[in-house]
Image (spheres, rainbow, N blue to C red):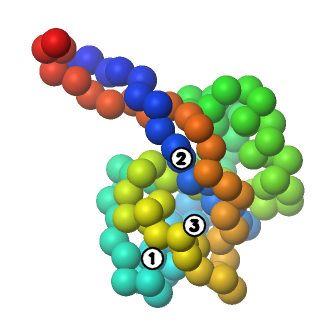
Amino acid sequence: MKQAAVPALLSVLSGTFHLQPRALAALRDAADSLRLRFRLEDVDVIGEAGPVRLAHYFRPAIVARIQELQGDDDTVIVIRPCPLTATPLFPPMGGRLRLLGRFAGEISETTDGSP
């Protein structure tokens, strides 16, 4: 099996959490409020080394735009296509997460190598 880069529209959220478990708890609370489920492998919580980690998904101009939109928030969450990203009301208003936008990027998918 090998990894392949696949184009995807990725949702990016931000907030202030200081610790990854708190960001995941906020994400779970937001999902629960809309009765949505997600898999942890569809979510990447980025607290430190933001530019480097975001570069795994996006080209440099988009990384710069995300960081500009992030402002003082210390955590960014990248969400792969899943029930959360298919719901226009996610994240709900009044929560601890802000939707920065949906950006064209790439995700790594495992392939079996067959044509």
Name the residue tied to disc 2: 10
Q: Amino acid at mark 2?
A: Leu
Name which of mark 1 and mark 2 comes first in the sequence: 2
SS at circle 3: helix
Q: Amino acid at mark 1?
A: Ala
In this rendered view, identify the residue nearer to me: 40 or 6. Answer: 6
In the displayed structure, 55 sits above or below 39; it is above
In the displayed structure, 89 sits above or below 100; it is below
Looking at the image, residue 73 sits to the left or right of residue 84; the answer is right
Q: Residue 47: x and y, percent?
A: 66, 51
Looking at the image, residue 9 sits to the left or right of residue 97; the answer is left
* Residue 23 - label: 3
Are the residues tagged 1 and 2 within 8 Å (C-beta)?
A: no
Looking at the image, residue 91 sits to the left or right of residue 72; the answer is left
SS at circle 1: helix
Q: CA distance from mark 3 to mark 1?
A: 12 Å
Q: Residue at x 52, y 44 (%)?
A: 9
Are the residues tagged 3 and 2 within 8 Å (C-beta)?
A: no
Specify the quadrant of the image occupied by residue 67.
top right
Q: Of discs 1 and 2, which sits in the foreground?
A: 2
Q: Of discs 3 and 1, which sits in the foreground?
A: 1
